[in-house]
Amino acid sequence: MFVKKILMLAERMQPGNGVSDYCGKLSSILSENGYEVHIAFFSGSDYTERIGNIYKHGISFVLHGNNLFTWAMMMNNELKRRGREIFNEHGFDVIHANDWLTTPAGIAMKKLTGKPLLVTIHSTENERGFSDPQSPSISDIEWWACYEAAKVLVSSQRTFHSIKNDLGVPAEKIDILKLHDDSWQERVLDIYSRALVMENVIHGEQTAD
């Protein structure tokens, strides 16, 4: 039986953190519907924990940058390394990155494997006030992530409009996916089903062989 496998990239998996809770709920829904999910994230130690069809891959990182941007770019090298190990050991069919903090690794894994990339932008740098010295670079990464992604997911109209107007992303490429909507699970599965169709189209000749 073919098991659909997802690589999910997150800065952290910490209860009470909005992005962490989003990734956790998303992974649970996918797992309940026959997906195998591998979550790679920064942690205080290196470990892999399996709960049913969900694998949590903690990645330790001891270096400290002098700002969040520098640290995140260094951390992405470790995410890329662990993502490649997961691909070699388990394989995956779709990559899902979250925010600028993990999208460089997601883009690198897309280019390495040829697998489709989904990106969730939880908020843009424009929404956050564009007040950091690294804001122009962060906004560029957000644009790059949206350009490389097969689909961009957001959780609010405000972020939808920021991505559309500030980053110039076509509206048809963006899906609003609100965590507490009644249709959330159904829409998640539809988005992933379409991504898997894309993966089969990209690798159709290889699959046919």
Image (cartoon, grey):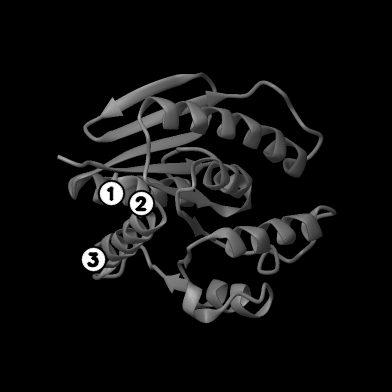
The mark closer to the camera, 3 or 2, is: 2
* Residue at screen point 43% across, 43% down: 8
The mark closer to the camera, 3 or 1, is: 1
| Mark 1: few/some/many CA within 10 Å (<14, 14-19, 20+) | few
Sequence-first disc among 3 and 1: 3
Numbered badge on residue 186: 3
Left or right of 204, for residue 83: right
Screen quadrant of the C terminus: top left
Separation (CA) of disc 1 from disc 2: 5 Å
Residue 139: percent from left, percent from top: 72, 61
Residue 190: percent from left, percent from top: 28, 65
* Residue at screen point 61% across, 58% down: 145
| Mark 3: few/some/many CA within 10 Å (<14, 14-19, 20+) | few
Numbered badge on residue 205: 2
In the displayed structure, 174 sits above or below 10; it is: below
* Secondary structure state at the residue bearing disc 3: helix
Q: Identify the image quadrant of residue 15.
A: top left
Considering depth in this image, is 74 or 22 the residue closer to the camera? Answer: 74
* Secondary structure state at the residue bearing disc 2: helix
Q: Amino acid at mark 1?
A: Ala
In the displayed structure, 177 sits above or below 92; it is: below
* Residue at screen point 37% across, 40% down: 92
Q: Amino acid at mark 2?
A: Glu
Q: Are marks 1 and 2 in contact (CB under 8 Å)?
A: yes
Residue 183: percent from left, percent from top: 25, 70
